[in-house]
Amino acid sequence: MHSRNVLAAAVALAGAPSVHAVLRFSCSELVTERLDPLVFPGAMQSPHVHQIAGGNMFNVTMDPNRHNIGEEATCTTCTFSEDFSNYWTAILYFRARNGTLIRVPQRPNIDFDGARGGGMTVYYTATYQNHKPTAFQPGFRMIVGNPMYRTQAEASRYRQMTFTCLETLSTRTGETTEMPKQPCREGIMSNVRFPTCWDGKTLDPPDHSSHVAYPSSGTFESGGPCPASHPVRIPQLFYEVLWDTRRFNDRSLWPEDGSQPFVWSYGDYTGYGTHGDYVFGWKGDSLQRAMDANCDFYCPQLKTQSIATGNQCRQNQKVAENIDGPFDRLPGNVEITGPQPGASNPNPGNGGGSTQTPVQPTPVPNPGNGGGCSVQKWGQCGGQGWSGCTVCASGSTCRAQNQWYSQCL
Ligand SMILES: *[C@@H]1O[C@H](CO)[C@@H](O)[C@H](O)[C@H]1NC(C)=O
Ligand SMILES: *[C@@H]1O[C@H](CO)[C@@H](O)[C@H](O)[C@H]1NC(C)=O
């Protein structure tokens, strides 16, 4: 079977001896817009564009104390119809030689033809080594990756955030942590894999990520143990998103220095800032039942719907704006920063052919404990940003990265 072969290839790549219990399903596009209810709750609009899949409870604000998404949602774009979770990632643009930006469409994965907007393929892998995973709980949310990252060293803080240059739709080898440097015949696939160990109690910390961790030795695939701080094994959540670069593969359209022309909606040529967001929303105990049943692709324990039915679930943009281009600047005026992979003469600024000026981080003074709070929130510190006031731990200084992000460095 086709999907089996694809997965077998993925598993072989990971060096894992066996597979048990993998849910693999399609979630069509719900809406694509500049919202981010995890990092910028209430903000109409967030700094950069996301494509969002899943249930129709997605909103500008998603109250973390409201734990019944799976009961309140009325439709989902996913083919497992009890899954009202939301899944989102950034989107990709092509930057022409003259600087014009055009959105790169998405395309459906193998087996999922007809998924509106291409959507994404979602996997929940229970285990490779017969451990019993604990499903995510109502209220659980997490983010993996960081859109501020532009170097390999930064990106290495996350494991398994990669790109696949699709020679065919079933290419599953040659994953890279930076954007492919060469034209990819059938497109580029983003692989977004989340950590697989949980602290067992925190549903959504202010930084949306410190409650999860990677195995303390080995890998998820090799059955490596979870660290004592995060002892609970959770399923591996994994998104595949296919970017249809076919109409942009002609090298004569690429920058004259040979660099690759694709830039992420958060202003990144490198791909090191790739990230994914998750808001759990499975109905009742359906995900735990599927994990306990060792479901493998097909899951009689779960209700399903067709791709066409899932496609009927959609939201209008709440932030109404052109996100497809062509335009001169990214939506939200996001600056493009970082070296351009493949440039014969890499420019540490914003890459060959670019006319935008990279933003230099502006140090801002550490406000100490002014404001009376000391919580490290995602993407900001020093009392700036959208999610309330924060300070840095002693030994680090709050530095503004741009008008939206500041980090303790
Ligand atoms: C989104 O939030 C707005 C404002 O609170 C509310 O009016 C609307 O009903 C919400 N939409 C959904 C789908 O919950
Ligand atoms: C810039 O290049 C793109 C792609 O080649 C083209 O469609 C567009 O018309 C050009 N824009 C200008 C202003 O020349």
Image (tube, helix red, strand yellow):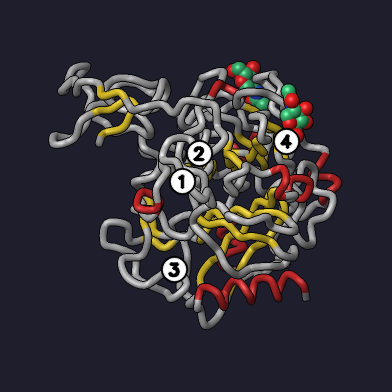
Say which of marks 2 and 4 sits in front: 2
The residue tagged 3 is 220
Residue drawn where x is 39% and y is 48% of the image:
151
- The amino acid type found where label 4 is placed reads Thr
Residue drawn where x is 50% and y is 61% of the image:
235
Q: Are marks 2 and 1 in contact (CB under 8 Å)?
A: yes
The residue tagged 4 is 74
Q: Mark number for residue 346?
A: 1
* SS of the residue under disc 4: loop
Percent position of residue 294, x then y: 60, 71
- The amino acid type found where label 2 is placed reads Gly
**Alpha carbon of mark 4 to alpha carbon of mark 3: how far?**
34 Å
Answer with left or right where residue 318 lies relative to residue 141.
right
Q: Are marks 1 and 3 in contact (CB under 8 Å)?
A: no
Q: Is residue 308 above or below residue 409?
A: below
Percent position of residue 138, x then y: 51, 44
Dot 2 crowding, Cα within 10 Å, few <14, some 14–19, many 20+: many
Dot 4 crowding, Cα within 10 Å, few <14, some 14–19, many 20+: few
Q: Are marks 4 and 1 in contact (CB under 8 Å)?
A: no
* Figure disc tally: 4
Q: Quadrant of the N terminus?
A: bottom right
Compare marks 2 and 1 and give the one earlier in the sequence.
1
Percent position of residue 155, x then y: 40, 51
**Alpha carbon of mark 1 to alpha carbon of mark 3: how far?**
35 Å
The residue tagged 2 is 351
Residue drawn where x is 74% and y is 65% of the image:
168
Relative depth, front residue between 389 and 401: 401
Percent position of residue 341, x then y: 52, 49
